[in-house]
Image (cartoon, rainbow, N blue to C red):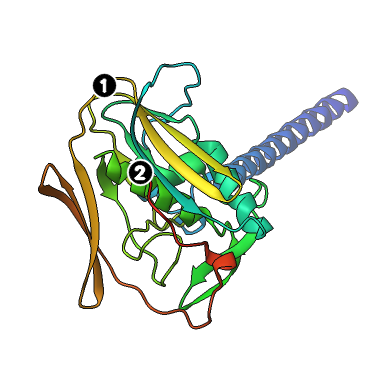
Amino acid sequence: MKKLLSTVLIAVLICTTLTACQETAQVNATQDSTTKTTTTTTTTTRTTEDLNTTFKEAATDTVYPQLNKDYDGSYPYKISTYSTYYDTSNSTRTVNIKNAVSKLDNLMIPDGSTFSFNQTVGKRTVLAGYEEAKVVQGDEFVDGLGGGICQVSSTIFQAALRANLEITVRACHSLEISYVPLGADATVQWNTQDFRFKNNSGSDIRLSVSASEGTLTCSVYAAEDINIGRVDIKVSKDGGSYVLKRSVNGEVNYTTYSKYKKPKTTTTAKDSGKTTTKKN
């Protein structure tokens, strides 16, 4: 009788232990499942692109094939050149101009390729070496990072015009500037406004860009002896607009319009650059 009772008690204990183990396993499995689900959800949420915090150009702007510098290639034919002038005593503006020039000098643009100023020069940041100088904001000139960059883009714009290259994106400043004639500028702003042209010359070309002793120059050289025609650039005033026209061999092939406001405060030549003279 005692043996039978002992056997029954042992059987009950074994059943109870097995049941408890199964319940524990189920709880652990549930906890693991909950943890995995929570982890997956959190990870997905954190790594999904948030359009509210992503630069617009990542989704909307065109990214062209990267242009590279060519130091050794032969580009013996100068097809255009243009110079503007800046005040070297404005140290921060000078730093910004030279910083941009360093990204552009010796840049090779294959035949048929598009040049993007913003894509080539990159974002103007402190880490990229840019400093505060006068920029346009609203109806006045204020201190802003990268001031002076637009003089570089405007100088290249004028050289590209004279090389009879196809201008695809160009806009004027909202306020009057002085380093090029009104109607002859090309403003740029990261993530908002670019300057672009297409190399439709029939030859690979290379930009030669320099900034030294107050003179900023952009020259365009071609690898082949191409005939760009007789290029003439004229800017005229038509009511409240400035009209720039490029004619080649007597026929107009590019026209752009510009309107400006007067700045709220007077800006000196030291802040915005000096008036340009052309070199053909």
Q: Is residue 209 above or below residue 110?
A: below
**Of pointers 2 and 1, the one earlier in the residue sequence:** 2
Question: Is there any visible trace of residue 101 in the rendered image?
Answer: yes
Considering every residue shown, the one lying at the far left of the view is: 251
User: As drawn, is 230 to the left or to the right of 94?
Assistant: left
Q: Quadrant of the N terminus?
A: top right
x and y percent of residue 237 in the render?
Answer: 23, 71
* Residue at which label 1 appears: 225
Tag shown at residue 97: none
Q: Quadrant of residue 93?
A: bottom right
Identity of the residue drawn at 48% across and 26% down: 69
Which element carries disc 2, helix, strand or loop? Answer: helix
Circle 2/circle 1 CB separation < 8 Å: no
Characterize the local packing of mark 2: few (<14), some (14-19) or many (20 or more) Cα atoms within 10 angstroms: many
Crowdedness near tag 1: few (<14), some (14–19) or many (≥20) residues, C-alpha within 10 Å: some
Q: Is residue 113 above or below residue 164?
A: above
Q: Give percent across and percent down for residue 191.
A: 45, 55
Kindly identify the residue that appears in the image at 43 percent across and 56 percent down.
188
Circle 2 sits on which residue? 159
Residue at image coords 46%, 34%: 208
